[in-house]
Image (cartoon, rainbow, N blue to C red):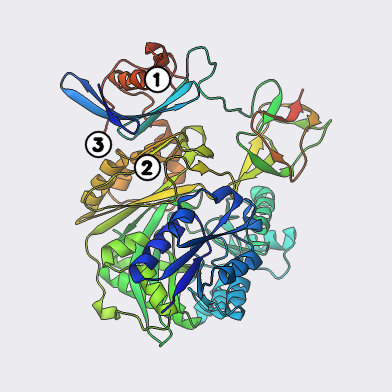
Amino acid sequence: MQPLGGGWYLVVDGDKQWRVAVAAEGDATWVFVDGQVARLAATGAGPARGRARSRGDGGVMAPMPATVVAINTSPGQPVQEGDTVIVLEAMKMEMPIKSPRAGIVKAVNCAKGDLVQPGVSLLEIE
Amino acid sequence: MIKRLLIANRGEIARRIIRACRELGVETVAVYSDADAKSPHVAEADQAVHIGAAAARFSYLNIEAIIEAAHAGHADAVHPGYGFLSERAPFVRACESAGLIFVGPPASALEKMGSKTGARALMAGAKVPVVPGETPDDQSDEALKAAAERVGFPVLIKPAAGGGGIGMKAVRDAASFGEALAAARREANAAFGNDTLYVERLIEQPRHVEIQVFADSHGNTVHVFERECSAQRRHQKVVEESPCAALSPAVRQRMGVAAVAAARAVGYVNAGTCEFLLEGSGDSANFYFLEMNTRLQVEHPVTECVTGIDLVHVQLRVASGEPLPFTQGGLSQRGHAIECRIYAEDPSQGFIPQAGPILLYSEPQGPGIRVDSGVKSGTDVSVHYDPLLAKLIVHAPTREAARRRAITALGEYAILGIRTNIPFLLQILDHPQFVKAAIDTGFLDRESAALAAAIPTTIPTAVLAAVEAHRSGASARAAEAMDDQAIDPFTTLRGWRG
């Protein structure tokens, strides 16, 4: 194993060798080899990706920073699994946010035009 | 000749135009928003002018701020790039009335082509074939639905103003028309400030083939051959190439003639592109005019590779009043070029756009490899703009050689810190249908889930030695988690460089 500078390393294993690029992001490490990219989480750091998903404890979350362009439901309304409950827009593309399950909308925590952050609950379903 | 050019754009296209200007001895003025103060295009211009807040409507879409920047920077001309204000007639008129040369078509040509409905009528008059469709004057939900039923499902709803696939929705039946219509309206309004829609017949399994045209202000109009752009995901082009494998010389000739007729019909000047749907292949193929993009295209480099023409150089010369430096008879295609668009998106998470800092950036280099990029190590990819980071363009004597060159180059293209579609591009280039050039515009929408699922999720275990070296204190424990998955103790990646 030989550092090549600028985050690049030459890894030799028997009769094979790879040029590998490495970059640290906090406790996690990004690795590149042969067009392939992996993000390695540090031990005990929880899930490998801190990304919020639009499912969980009855909450609906934004997958990335985005603007709310439509809210298709309101508190007290029933929703079915897969219903488009909120439409977000980021990078010029609309992203429909579907209900993760059937239930009654308990609260809507955002308004049309809001810039919402990932990991924040947009809508609660019970 | 233009002396000092303001580039009303950002990212890779701003850098590509700056480079052309350097070569021609034209000085450059870059513009930037709050989010782009440290972007490469800002550092590379002769001068850079701040034009506003990060959101595009306060900066790159702000006509007043850009005209002011042109005056402040003593520019005598403006190049709009693509996207943003490039196809907005009010911007062209604002440039003209400010005494600035607009590097592009006259506002009148842009207006005629900018309205898809008006363009359809003009094209029909110029004997350019068009897809059946209509734009009801009454834009109510009911009237649009009735129009869809007259045209016949499946239909495509499109914004009358605009392009790039924004606001475009395919609808298979009357039941799902309502939701698609609402989304198309919102996207059209947000992107173009105009929510007029039209409905046209969806041609099943067509190819997207476009013809580059070029006209000067002396009455010369030529075509510069085709680009095949069928590899699109949700109407966003992903891989483009030239020539198109499905075009016979006779059909290529007829499409070229139709594209020149289209350009002449609107009094076109400078570089433009006529997009066609191609139905079938060989001598029996039919083609239908879709729209004209009244600007330089993202994928223009594949044309530059196969024809040897620098389209931006010619744009600047034509805008300065010079005649075209070539005639139709002097143009030919040589070899094969493929462009891969590098997007900040995560193929394994439904292609969700990515934002954040690029920790490491390293481009491939070698014979026949060109990278047009808007980023470097340390660039913070913003949520405010298009996720296109860069374009890899390869040129080789044959399609197969170009395909293998692209695969090799992508395998050397390192971007760390945010996810990109590079692993997905590698899967596309290796797909049997792509290998045979047997693709249509639905190819990626049908295959992208399977292609994304086929992306290897493991890396050779030995490579972890580099991680250990890089992270003092970190050891084999880093191997415990990789992307939510355990690392298999194997040493080669399947199908690699197959």
Contact check, label 3 and label 1, Cβ < 8 Å: no
Do the residues indicated by labels 2 and 3 lie within the same chain of the protein?
yes
- Residue drawn at (40%, 65%) of the image: B210
SS for callout 1: loop
A44, above or below B327, in the image: above
Q: Nearer the viewer, mark 3 or mark 1?
A: 1
Contact check, label 1 and label 2, Cβ < 8 Å: no
Packing grade of label 3 (10 A; few <14, some 14-19, many >=20) is few
Q: Name the quadrant containing residue A52.
A: top right
- Sequence-wise, the earlier of marks 2 and 3 is 2
SS for callout 2: helix
Residue type beneath disc 3? Arg
Residue identifier under label 1: B471
* Disc number for residue B497: 3
Q: Residue furthest right?
A: A76
Contact check, label 2 and label 3, Cβ < 8 Å: no
- Location of the N terminus of chain A (image quadrant): top left
Q: Nearer the viewer, residue B430 or B67?
A: B67
- Sequence-wise, the earlier of marks 1 and 2 is 2
Give percent across and percent down for residue B51: 61, 59
Question: In 3D space, how far apart are the residues under numbered discs 2 and 3 (Cα atoms)?
Answer: 13 Å
* Disc number for residue B425: 2
* Disc number for residue B487: none
Question: In 3D space, how far apart are the residues under numbered discs 1 and 2 (Cα atoms)?
Answer: 30 Å
Give percent across and percent down for residue B374: 44, 51
SS for callout 3: loop
Q: Nearer the viewer, residue A31 or B160?
A: A31
- Sequence-wise, the earlier of marks 3 and 1 is 1
Left or right of residue B332: residue B348: right
Left or right of residue A71: residue B281: left
